[in-house]
Image (cartoon, rainbow, N blue to C red):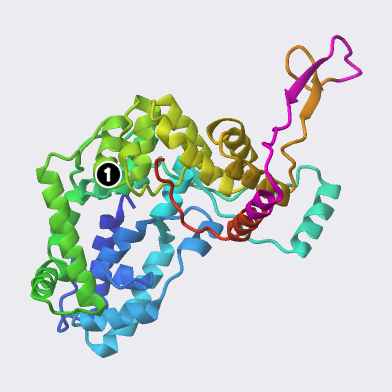
Amino acid sequence: MNNISSLARQAQTHLQAIAGAGNAVVKRSHVYELMAAALGLGSHATLKAHGLLCPLPSQPLLAHYGALHPGPCAARAETLGVARERCEPLAQALCADMAAKALGLVPWEDILGALLSGSRELYRETPRDDKYYESLHAALDDDPDAWPEDPEPLRLESPFVCQALQKAAGQGEGRAHLALGLLVERGARVDAGHQGGDDAEEDADMDDLPDSRAGLYGYERQQKGEVLTGVELEWAEDYAERVQRRAAASRDLATRSSTARDHFNAAAALGQHDALLLLADRYGDDRFFDLQAPQVRADPLWIADLAQRVGRYEWAPAWLALAAERGDMRAMRELMESWQAGDPVKVWTWFHYARLLGMDLTQGDYRAIHGDGSSYDDDVGGPMFVDGMDGVELPAVDESVRQETLRAAQSLFARMKGDNGLLPSAQ
């Protein structure tokens, strides 16, 4: 199977035979809608917004991403004009075809999570109980080489995934551009431009989707103030998104790119703030720090360092504070000793917060090392050096300030267990 179009073409023939010659014609566009329903989604538009449909190479991945739902698929078939008595057999057949191809829907967040962490592979571990490990240890006692092989990962640089990403990028999906940029800069072979063949055929298929015509109708009804629900609402929203994407394309956004920087710029123009971070890190482009409400996956401590590297120093304390709120001791120390050293209330708040997390930042932290920086080993001997840092000196404050800052730290500690969603703002 080269791409989803190949499966859709095969499935169309199979499903039409089940629907019967005298029944409604099963269009290729219907197959896409039915695949979405089989995955528990309301429409193909929702599927595309959620992630990539692709074959999964191992059982843990399939168990996590490949759950199929014949019931919603049968219900969707009926709305597309298939006779009621044929809907269930048709849904069962499509789900069987999808299972035979090991198809699953991998969310954008999981794809980008892997790529942004530096991996080009996506794994899923199978939950194991105590009995599994007991039997494994017993097997290893008998044969030290009996350790089981890791399940095959989804390789994100595979031709299938890259082609699916190119297709999505060509339709204005910023997350696909971001993924492609990360793959390109790590050496993956990704051809620029729109793909022909099956992809061009899929474009024609999609023009026949119900949400192309019904979406326009629903969109116009929305503009007149009518409230839509269900699939009609999804179609109308998807149509509105298409209008926005075409407008973006008319402003010369990069929908066909060849370099990582091209893809990052295209992703940034399509609202991907992580792409702006990468542009700042790789090329010194500091537009990220002009955002009013950045939404990113990156470590805030890393962003604080990046702000200083690109000369946007005013943003460093805000991102350091976010890292500190999440319990990062280095961030707390840097705030106490540098950025907020002149504010006794903040210094004492971070001190109390670190204590609540089990660290006393007023205590020095030293260790013996060799000249090369490695930990000192008595068996090796030789000159001993001392490495480490002094404890933070706290400013003098009265008891009322100590109690006020302790209460503030306790509030931070109570919130840390759940993500409060706060985003930094430049001071």
Q: Would you say residue 267 sits in the magenta stretch?
A: no
Q: Would you say residue 394 sits in the magenta stretch?
A: yes
In this rendered view, identify the residue nearer to me: 124 or 35: 124
Q: Residue furthest top?
A: 383
Please give the residue where the numbered disc 1 appears in the rendered image. Answer: 166
In this rendered view, identify the residue nearer to me: 425 or 54: 425
Q: Which residues are magenta?
A: 377-405
The spot of residue 334 in percent (x, y) is 59, 33
Q: How would you rate the neighbour count of disc 1 (Cα within 10 Å): few for under 14, some for 14-19, many for 20 or more?
A: many
Above or below, 204 relative to 317 = below
Residue 380, quarter of the rendered image = top right
The spot of residue 16 in percent (x, y) is 22, 74
Q: Is residue 11 visible?
A: yes
Above or below, 190 relative to 124 = above
Report the quarter where the C terminus lies. top left
> Label 1 is placed on what type of residue?
Gln
In this rendered view, identify the residue nearer to me: 241 or 299: 299
Residue at 48 percent across and 41 percent down: it is 319
Q: Is residue 240 left or right of residue 264?
A: left
Q: Is residue 355 left or right of residue 297?
A: right
